[in-house]
């Protein structure tokens, strides 16, 4: 009885969110005030699940017949997903009216996608990863085209669906080969049998196909084709969710699947693949972002570069690399959501004010927004003492410890290149004259979300050691 109660307490974040989705459906169907109630209900629901995840971070267990892990870094991922999605809901309250897509199902889809992310992060079985991936992906395909009246949104949704389905095909075929050669889908058993499985060409092919499929999901080069168009065509707040929650969930699935395998061997046999796509993603994302005039496309290419930095941690194949990725994802989620949040606030009707030229002279008209956006740009560029700097620092250190110093050097070069396009936005806001009249609508909920993001970025930047120590303590 006590064990059952403890198990229930450990899965409570999932129960809270699952029950909340059912309640949200009932509110949407039967309440006349669902338009006002549902956004705030979603925010409270997600924050409650996130706070409980932090409180119960030390309650480590494996439940559901050894298919789902709870506690430890799983709960840290839960916090990243739920808090990130809560900020997206806050940003969307006024933005969706401006965007012309105020549908109740928007919030239900956001909640459902987060539930899928949580399944992926806690998976102890490959099929649990697949279940979470599909729940998240289907929600994302619909969210990309939530405004049916906009051609760009329809195009974004279709591209995301087609390429997402293509990536899922790789993952499913990879899972089939892994199961066929290992004769199990349990991640723990696969990790134990890895020394003998590593000589099986079918097993290695299956893992590579699995990695290729998730390379699509994390937006790594050369599997990034969908990213710029999908981010540009989707609602800005939705693009923020794709670039943070979606990326964090995909990395969580890779860490869950390969983390124990990597740490049980002397040499990471997938290092060449991971190192090559890390280099290509960093350099491609940073160089192409320089030529972008649309700020959403610039952030899309920036997202590709950041995927490359995080892949350095996977290529390192050690505990430090895993801890660095989780820390990086926590920092990246809030600094990127903050940047997308300010873009959503400044964006006008009919997708106006998205060109970089619209940000000229912003500091004289909206000094607070300009200051906040500058802070996020500095953090994304990896300038100390902001959270983004420490994210890069930890993955670079992991690479050096794994004797991949050359990879860390490429990462530093890519970071130096990226400083140009991040600081260009700051220069435009503070040192250029206003070219066109840009009116910014007041949104208290949007500003609240941005302020929370700023606070979290600053806190992570001030005390990075506390977070990295907590993450590392659950890996050893």
Image (cartoon, rainbow, N blue to C red):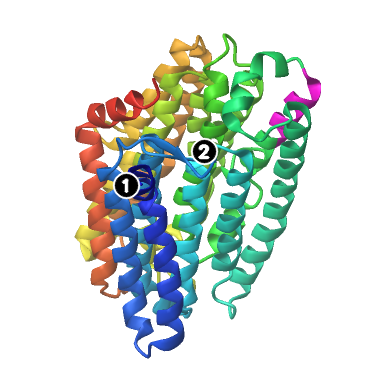
Q: Nearer the viewer, residue 223 or 361?
A: 223
Q: Residue furthest bottom?
A: 32
Q: Residues within 10 Å of mark 1 (few under 14, many from 20)?
A: many
SS for callout 2: helix
Residue 192: x percent and y percent? 60, 19
Magenta span main SS: helix
Q: Choose the circle earlier in sequence order: 1 or 2.
A: 1
SS for callout 1: helix
* Residue identified by numbered label 2: 251
Magenta highlight on residue 64: no
On the image, which quarter does residue 356 sit in? Answer: bottom left
Q: Which span of residues is magenta-colored? A: 200-209
Residue 441: x percent and y percent? 29, 75
Q: Residue at x 53, y 30 (%)?
A: 311
Q: Nearer the viewer, residue 167 or 231?
A: 167
Quadrant assignment for the C terminus:
top left
Residue 287: x percent and y percent? 54, 37
Q: Is residue 276 above or below residue 447?
A: above
* Camera-nearest label, 1 or 2: 1
* Residue identified by numbered label 1: 53
Q: Residue at x 57, y 8 (%)?
A: 266
Is residue 349 among what the camera can see?
no
Q: Nearer the viewer, residue 267 or 403?
A: 267
Q: Nearer the viewer, residue 254 or 292?
A: 254
Q: Residues within 10 Å of mark 2 (few under 14, many from 20)?
A: many
Residue 29: x percent and y percent? 46, 85
Residue 370 falls left or right of residue 269: left
Q: Is residue 429 above or below residue 378?
A: below
Q: Is residue 434 above or below residue 458?
A: below
Magenta highlight on residue 208: yes
Residue 200 falls left or right of residue 286: right
* Distance (Cα) linking label 1 and label 2: 19 Å
């Amino acid at each position: 009885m006590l064990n059952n109660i403890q198990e229930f307490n450990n899965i409570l974040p999932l129960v809270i969110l699952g029950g909340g989705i059912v309640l949200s459906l009932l509110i949407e169907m039967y309440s006349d005030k669902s338009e006002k109630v549902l956004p705030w209900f979603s925010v409270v629901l997600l924050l409650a699940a996130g706070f409980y995840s932090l409180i119960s971070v030390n309650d480590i267990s494996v439940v559901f017949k050894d298919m789902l892990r709870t506690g430890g870094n799983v709960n840290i991922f839960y916090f990243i997903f739920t808090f990130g999605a809560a900020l997206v809901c806050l940003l969307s309250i006024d933005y969706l009216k401006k965007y012309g897509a105020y549908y109740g199902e928007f919030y239900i889809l956001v909640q459902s996608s987060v539930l899928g992310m949580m399944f992926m992060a806690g998976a102890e079985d490959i099929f649990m990863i697949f279940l979470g991936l599909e729940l998240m992906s289907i929600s994302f395909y619909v969210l990309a085209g939530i405004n049916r009246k906009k051609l760009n949104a329809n195009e974004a949704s279709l591209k995301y669906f087609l390429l997402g389905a293509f990536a899922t095909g790789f993952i499913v075929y990879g899972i089939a080969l892994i199961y066929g050669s290992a004769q199990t889908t349990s991640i723990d058993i696969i990790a134990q049998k890895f020394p003998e499985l590593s000589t099986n060409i079918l097993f290695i092919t299956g893992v590579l196909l699995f990695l290729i499929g998730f390379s699509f999901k994390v937006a790594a080069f050369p599997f990034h084709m969908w990213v710029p168009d999908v981010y540009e065509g989707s609602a800005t707040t939705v693009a923020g969710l794709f670039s943070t929650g979606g990326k964090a969930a995909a990395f969580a699935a890779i860490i869950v699947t390969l983390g124990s395998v990597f740490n049980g061997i002397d040499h990471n046999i997938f290092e060449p693949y991971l190192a090559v796509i890390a280099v290509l993603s960093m350099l491609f994302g940073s160089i192409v972002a320089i030529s972008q005039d649309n700020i959403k496309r610039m952030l899309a290419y920036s997202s590709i570069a950041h995927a490359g930095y995080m892949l350095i941690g996977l290529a390192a194949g050690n505990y430090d690399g895993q801890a660095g990725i989780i820390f990086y994802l926590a920092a990246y989620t809030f600094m990127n959501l903050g940047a997308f949040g300010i873009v959503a606030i400044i964006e006008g009707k009919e997708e106006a004010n998205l060109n970089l030229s619209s940000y000229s002279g912003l500091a004289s008209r909206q000094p607070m927004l300009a200051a906040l956006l500058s802070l996020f740009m500095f953090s994304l560029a990896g300038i100390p003492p902001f959270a983004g700097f420490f994210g890069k620092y930890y993955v670079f250190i992991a690479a050096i410890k794994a004797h991949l110093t050359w990879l860390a050097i490429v990462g530093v070069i890519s970071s130096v290149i990226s400083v140009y396009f991040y600081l260009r936005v700051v220069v435009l806001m503070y040192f250029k004259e206003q070219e066109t009249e840009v009116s910014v609508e007041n949104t208290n909920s949007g500003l609240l979300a941005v302020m929370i993001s700023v606070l979290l970025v600053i806190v992570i930047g001030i005390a990075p050691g506390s977070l990295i120590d907590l993450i590392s303590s659950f890996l050893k």
